Image (spheres, grey):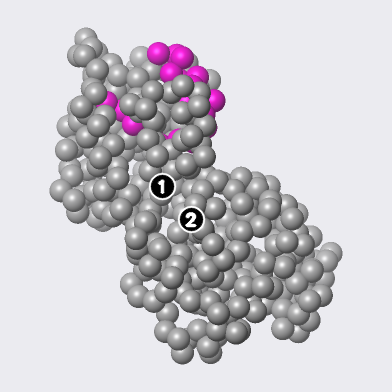
């Protein structure tokens, strides 16, 4: 099967969605697929694909202009048609709404089945109303059920949770006992990530633990950087909240005995949770998107309401106590990841979706 992944990418770093596509493409290649990618620009993602032997073509027509789901410019459609044909595409898998708005019309024109991984029900319904033909993959069970309730055909929607690479091995018990846990927060410095709530939780945590308060290490950049740093200074937290900027694959370089904190106000299927899970890292996360499906009980970490500063501080305190008392077992998290959330599991589930989509391929359109 020849699958082409369409994505709008960053030129300067490999963001979460790009890592997701890269790991998926690598896993699919290992399963015998002929995999390629169409991107809107050259950059680190394209370079990483080339390093793994995944052909990439740059199609500037993939860049969305105007309103979503309006008919794209004919020149852009023809460019994409040429790119898909050059890669011998049998199925097009889109990973961003901007790329889908261009790639799906081109795929429909030449009768190549299209799949979109996306979790915005309203935009999906709007695309269907505009006459576009594609299947939708949702990484959130709740969003999948929502679309089913909206009477979407079950031939058009599929639930496939995210997957990430498995970490090489579990942390040793000796390392767990010798390292005092700190806190790791990974994400863009934007309101949706709720980093201000995590900073305010550090005030409550310091009141509880005094000199034993862990350090919150924040990895990311974004529009709120100045505001958040000023907040830390005003609250007198410079000694326990530190900003390190964006660093790719940061969890690979952090002690697996640190605690991942995810304070987001909105997520779908956060990969950072899965990456932490694969390393056996304790996790405290807000109850958003697929998190409750990932962390089904307290053995795996703690889940707190969105924007509940006290609950976030208490959850971190509770997990710190469990770790100190030897009540946290990282092997349970690692086993859960290997059983449900590896990139290989994701590729296996997507293979079943692709086969179903190809079986229900619509009648031949007139080629453009």
Check the image and report above or below for 186 versus 240.
Answer: above
Expressed as whole percent of the image width and height from the top left, the position of residue 312 reads: 70, 62
Q: Which residues are magenta?
A: 112-131
The reply, left or right, for residue 345 in relation to residue 243 is: left
Looking at the rendered image, the quarter that the N terminus falls into is top left
Name the residue rendered at 51%, 59% in the picture.
295
Name the residue rendered at 18%, 44% in the picture.
33
Q: Earlier in the sequence, mark 1 or mark 2?
A: 1
- Give the structural element (helix, strand or loop) at label 1: loop
Q: Is residue 117 visible?
A: yes
Check the image and report above or below for 130 versus 39.
Answer: above
Name the residue rendered at 29%, 32% in the picture.
92
Cα distance, mark 1 to mark 2? Answer: 9 Å
Name the residue rendered at 69%, 73% in the picture.
317
Q: Which residue is mark 1?
A: 161
Expressed as whole percent of the image width and height from the top left, the position of residue 117 reads: 40, 37
Q: Which residue is mark 2?
A: 294
């Amino acid at each position: 099967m020849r699958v082409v992944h369409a994505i709008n990418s960053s030129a300067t770093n490999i963001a979460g969605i790009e890592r997701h596509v890269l790991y998926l493409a690598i896993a699919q290649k290992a399963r015998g697929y002929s995999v390629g990618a169409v991107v809107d620009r050259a950059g680190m993602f394209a370079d990483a694909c080339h390093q793994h032997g995944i052909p990439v073509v740059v199609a500037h027509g993939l860049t969305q202009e105007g309103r979503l789901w309006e008919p794209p410019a004919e020149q852009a459609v023809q460019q994409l048609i040429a790119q898909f044909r050059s890669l011998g595409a049998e199925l097009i898998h889109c990973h961003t709404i901007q790329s889908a708005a261009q790639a799906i019309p081109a795929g429909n024109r030449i009768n190549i089945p299209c799949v979109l991984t996306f979790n915005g029900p309203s935009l999906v319904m709007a695309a269907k109303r505009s006459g576009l033909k594609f299947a939708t993959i949702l990484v959130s069970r709740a969003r999948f059920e929502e679309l089913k309730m909206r009477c979407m055909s079950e031939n058009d929607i599929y639930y496939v949770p995210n997957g990430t690479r498995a970490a090489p091995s579990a942390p040793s018990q000796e390392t767990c006992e010798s390292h005092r846990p700190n806190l790791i927060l990974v994400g863009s410095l934007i309101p949706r990530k709720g980093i201000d709530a995590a900073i305010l939780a550090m005030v409550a945590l310091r009141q509880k633990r005094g000199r034993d308060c862990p350090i919150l290490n924040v990895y990311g950049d974004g529009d709120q950087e100045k505001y958040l740093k000023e907040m830390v200074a005003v609250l007198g937290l410079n000694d326990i909240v530190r900003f390190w900027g964006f660093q790719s694959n940061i969890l690979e370089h952090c002690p697996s005995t640190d605690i991942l904190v995810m304070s987001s106000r909105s997520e779908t299927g956060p990969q950072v949770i899965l990456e932490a899970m694969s390393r056996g890292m304790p996790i405290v996360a807000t109850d958003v998107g697929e998190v409750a499906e990932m962390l089904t009980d307290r053995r795996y970490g703690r889940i707190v309401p969105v924007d509940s500063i006290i609950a976030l501080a208490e959850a971190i305190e509770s997990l710190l106590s469990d770790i100190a008392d030897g009540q946290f077992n990282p092997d349970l998290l690692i086993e859960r990841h290997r059983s449900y959330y590896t990139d290989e599991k994701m590729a296996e589930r997507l293979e079943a979706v692709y086969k179903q989509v190809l079986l229900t391929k619509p009648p031949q359109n007139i080629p453009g």
